[in-house]
Image (tube, rainbow, N blue to C red):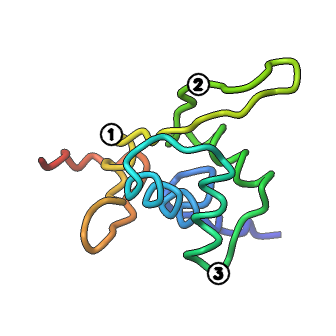
Amino acid sequence: MARRAPKNRTGNRYSDRLCSQLARILNHRGEPMTALMIYEAHCGRWKNNPTRNELSNYLGKSGYFEKVETDGPMERGGVHIWKLDREKCRRRGWFEVPMQNRHVNDPLPLRD
């Protein structure tokens, strides 16, 4: 049986569409946000919304977002506050106008 081509051709494990949308939300706001705030901003702007569990997985595992701090009692898990890793997102071309979606290992130098 022939191997099927991967859906995501940019070398990233997580959806480029959703990661770029989350990056644009955090970039537009300009300050760290909780997952609930990010979820509400995403639901008000786009149609295909992730579940809250998917959103938490993207924030924690994709590598484009950093956990700033945790608020609340630690015995109940607390609330994580997330910020954007701007350098990684700029390398992907997500802040360009029009938006580009470069490969993860793109050798193009950054423009300032």
Q: Given this view, does label 2 or label 3 mark the residue nearer the observer?
A: 2
Helix or strand or loop: what does disc 2 sit on? strand
x and y, in percent, of residue 17 in the image: 54, 67
Instruction: Specify the amino acid type for callout 3.
Output: Lys
Of the numbered discs 3 and 1, the one sitting upstream in the chain is 3
Q: Residue furthest left?
A: 112
Front in this rendered view, residue 18 or 34: 34
Which mark, residue 69? 2
Mark 1 nearby-residue class (10 Å; few <14, some 14–19, many ≥20): few
* Residue positioned 54% across, 57% down in the render: 19
- Secondary structure of the residue carrying tag 1 is helix
- First in sequence, mark 2 or 1: give its number: 2
Residue 70 place in picture, x, y as percent: 65, 25
Q: Is residue 5 left or right of residue 86?
A: right
- Residue 47: x %, y % from top left: 64, 81
Amino acid type, residue under disc 1 in the picture: Glu
The image quarter in which residue 44 lies? bottom right
Rendered image: mark on residue 87: 1
- Are circles 3 and 1 on residues that touch, CB within 8 Å? no
Q: Residue at x 42, y 43 (%)?
A: 31
Real-space CA distance between mark 3 and mark 1, rounded to the nearest whole angstrom: 28 Å
Q: Is residue 92 left or right of residue 60?
A: left
Label at residue 73? none
Earlier along the polypeptide chain: callout 2 or callout 3? 3
Of 21 and 101, nearer the camera is 21
Q: Residue at x 83, y 69 (%)?
A: 1
Q: Which residue is mark 3?
A: 47
Q: Is residue 13 above or below residue 74?
A: below
Q: Are marks 2 and 1 in contact (CB under 8 Å)?
A: no
Residue 20, placed above or below residue 112: below
Q: Amino acid at mark 2?
A: Glu
Q: Secondary structure at mark 3?
A: loop
